[in-house]
């Protein structure tokens, strides 16, 4: 069973994000890039399905800057088999629709039974790409999946909804998107990190895909970025003659003033 994982690299959620002078992009020099957390669930699920089905391969597909090959390498160290990086300076400001179109064009030439993606990327957060790819490829989309079962060319998925869940079924090939609770992603072992260095990552440009004028079709652009409003947090220094006294006063503040405990 061949599975494609759509994986985006995003800034580490713990990173301090700074807006650039142009006011439409972020400073990337000091940013640590990681696998979008929902896509990490996708990588884990793909590996588990391949192991359970006893064959096939897991292909990681990323559109993004050249530096994204490092996060693809992390997914290969988790156990994926090969990577494809779509990278072209002309699409640095790509919107989700063009991103989906470009990814779908590549997928038209890749054998797959299943595509696993995240429901949203934690940075740009448009929740658009998997649905648009489903439309471009004409394959069914089952979203926010917390459990899946594959047999006889079909996939059955449990999907979370408010106060409950729905069980859905579709013929393969299909696209599913992940949800928290689907699995617990593994950490790459040292041996697998070494093995991953030898696995193949193919880079494709727009010309390779035959879409070299696509950037003219970008329909949305970022007009401005802003930081969230500052919270007016009150600063309190807890005084006391001893550590025990300070701890007791801190406990009081947390219980009575902040209402946290
Ligand atoms: C060739 C190319 C180069 C690009 N280069 C850059 C760049 O240098 N810098 C930059 O900031 N943006 C770049 N982009 C655009 C971009 O990466 C965004 O992915 C895109 O606009 C999606 O928006 P989103 O994050 O809101 O996706 P959402 O729709 O919120 O994402 C949902 C899910 O879709 C999948 N997905 C989304 N984006 C990608 C992706 N790029 N690759 C694989 N799977 C994805 C993931 O599974 C994700 O969990 C590039 C796009 C292309 C096509």
Image: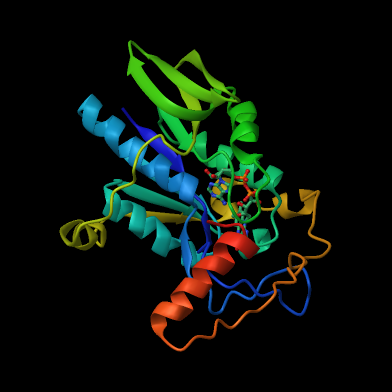
In the figure, residue 238 lies in which quadrant? bottom right
The image position of residue 11, as x and y in percent, is 54, 64
Compared with 148, 40 (above or below) is: below
The answer to which of 24 and 87 lies nearer the viewer is 24
Compared with 242, 164 (above or below) is: above
Left or right side of 86 for 79: left
The image position of residue 60, as x and y in percent, is 40, 46
Residue 175 appears in the picture as rendered? yes
The image position of residue 193, as x and y in percent, is 23, 61
Rendered-image quadrant of the N terminus = top left
Left or right side of 5 for 104: right
The residue lying furthest to the right in this view is 223
In the figure, residue 215 lies in which quadrant? bottom right
The answer to which of 85 and 32 lies nearer the viewer is 32
- At 70% from the left edge and 60% from the top edge, which residue is drawn? 93
User: How many numbered discs?
Assistant: 0
- At 59% from the left edge and 22% from the top edge, which residue is drawn? 138
The answer to which of 111 and 249 lies nearer the viewer is 249
- At 46% from the left edge and 89% from the top edge, which residue is drawn? 241
- At 59% from the left edge and 36% from the top edge, which residue is drawn? 130
Coloration mode: rainbow
The residue lying furthest to the left in this view is 191
The image position of residue 38, as x and y in percent, is 48, 45
Left or right side of 30 for 186: left
Compared with 118, 208 (above or below) is: below
The residue lying furthest to the top in this view is 152
Residue 140 appears in the picture as rendered? no
């Amino acid at each position: 069973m061949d599975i494609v994982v759509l994986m985006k690299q995003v800034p580490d959620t713990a990173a301090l994000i700074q807006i650039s002078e142009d006011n439409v992009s972020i400073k990337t020099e000091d940013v640590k890039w990681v696998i979008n957390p929902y896509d990490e669930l996708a990588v884990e699920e793909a590996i588990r399905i391949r192991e359970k089905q006893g064959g096939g391969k897991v292909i990681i597909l990323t559109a993004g800057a050249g530096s994204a090959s490092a996060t693809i390498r992390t997914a290969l160290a988790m156990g994926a088999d090969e990577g494809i990086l779509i990278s072209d300076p002309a699409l640095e400001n790509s919107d989700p629709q063009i991103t989906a179109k470009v990814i779908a064009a590549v997928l038209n030439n890749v054998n797959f039974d299943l595509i696993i993606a995240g429901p949203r990327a934690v940075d740009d957060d448009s929740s658009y790409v998997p649905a648009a790819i489903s439309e471009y490829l004409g394959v069914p989309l089952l979203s926010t999946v917390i459990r899946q079962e594959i047999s006889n060319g079909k996939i059955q998925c449990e999907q979370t909804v408010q106060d409950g869940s729905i069980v859905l079924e579709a013929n393969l090939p299909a696209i599913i998107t992940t949800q928290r609770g689907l699995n617990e992603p593994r950490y790459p072992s040292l041996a697998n990190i070494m093995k991953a260095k030898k696995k193949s990552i193919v880079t494709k440009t727009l010309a390779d895909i035959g879409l070299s004028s696509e950037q003219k079709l970008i329909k949305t652009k970022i007009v401005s970025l802003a930081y969230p409003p500052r919270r007016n947090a009150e600063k309190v220094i807890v005084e006391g003659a001893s550590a025990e006294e300070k701890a007791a006063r801190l406990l009081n503040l947390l219980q009575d003033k902040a209402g946290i405990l």
